[in-house]
Image (cartoon, helix red, strand yellow):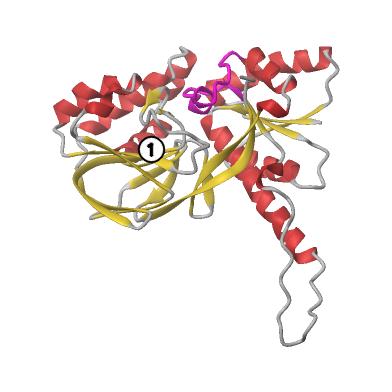
Amino acid sequence: MIGFVVNPASGNGRGRKVWRKLEEVLRNREIPHLVRFTTGQRDAEQFATEWASDKSEVTIIVAIGGDGTVHEVANGIYRAREANAAIQVSTAIPAIPAIPAIPAIPAIPTTPAHSTKPLGHVPAGSGNDYARGHGIPLQPLLALEVILSHSLSSIRCIDLIKMNNRIAVNSIGVGLDGRVARVTNEAIYKKLFNQLKLGRLSYVLSLLRVLFTYRTCSATLSMDGKGYLASKVWFIATANIPFYGGGMQICPKADPVSGHAELCVVSAIQRMELLRVFPQVYKGTHIHHKAITFYQGRRIKIDAERPLDIHMDGEMAGTTPVTLEVIPAILSIIVPQA
């Protein structure tokens, strides 16, 4: 049984239109499925948590929407996995000690990390970075076919980035980018650009709005115990996939199965120079600029001389200081077969 979590408001109504197309295909091919529609924040997460439990008949959970919808569904699956693992530990038969003085060895869950119900995705948002990062077709019917025709060879087990008991599937941005994400989510023009199928321009316009008033500051970073100090920091992007902000290749070498995250730190650069370099991000050629530094890490701490905005997969997630942790090979997803 396939469970579809549909965000009808994603892409300024595109989510609802996409579902109508998919529903017709599912009915014509008599494919058993369930569908739930979101009406507010965290609905998608709640639906995914219910379906990801061991008791649910749903075997595949599909997110129809943008990166925000994928973020919530992935968090729901992750939360259910943690709950299922806790239940297994609590119900396991304890070992019987041979000698009373020797403590029993606690039972270890036998469920492998990749045994969670896989996440499928049909993109219907404005940025669709998750789809780009995993080679999922942006055309809805083709994306559906990837899910319907999947096999064991098309199941990929990816890393997640954990922050404050939540996980990011794409990226976490700190500083200027966090502020831009906040402005974009609140902007009226985001709906207009989505209607014109130019959703990616929302981020660009928001960047221009924020760029000329944003104040840089010093920040400290710790990657796996190694400390770094950066002055006049614009932003710090921690990425699990290359794509960011609607098609930008912020960390071209980011790999969701590497076991670590890629960090892009932009600092000590003048506003007009940053604006000049910005278009290069779409091709990933910005990596050669002297003001841009890359790091890799599994456990990352970020602090700054003032609180900086943070986003997770484009959704606001508080301010610094923050500690991030890469959880390797924890989420099963459906991707096109090689």
Q: Quadrant of the C terminus?
A: top right
Q: Nearer the viewer, residue 100 or 125?
A: 100
Q: Would residue 335 appear left or right of 31 to someone viewing this image?
A: left
Q: How many marks?
A: 1
Label 1 sits on a secondary structure element that is: helix
The answer to whether residue 208 is seen in the rendering is no
Majority secondary structure in the magenta region: loop
Most extreme residue toward the front, as rendered? 98
The answer to whether residue 23 is seen in the rendering is yes
Q: Nearer the viewer, residue 80 or 299?
A: 299
Query: Can you give x and y, in whole percent of width and height, for residue 158 in the image?
Result: 57, 38
Q: Would residue 247 appear left or right of 175 to someone viewing this image?
A: right
Circle 1: residue type:
Arg
Query: Can you give x and y, in whole percent of width and height, for residue 72 in the image?
Result: 58, 40
| Residue numbers of the magenta segment | 122-139
Judge whether 83 appears above or below 142 on screen. below
Judge whether 222 appears above or below 121 on screen. below
Q: Nearer the viewer, residue 276 or 221?
A: 221
Query: Can you give x and y, in whole percent of width and height, for residue 274 in the image?
Result: 20, 28
The residue lying at 66 percent from left, 43 percent from top is 77
Residue at which label 1 appears: 182
The residue lying at 75 percent from left, 60 percent from top is 87
Q: Would residue 273 appear left or right of 262 to someone viewing this image?
A: left
Q: Quadrant of the N terminus?
A: top right
Query: Can you give x and y, in whole percent of width and height, for residue 146 in the image?
Result: 67, 19
The residue lying at 13 percent from left, 32 percent from top is 270
Judge whether 26 appears above or below 33 on screen. above
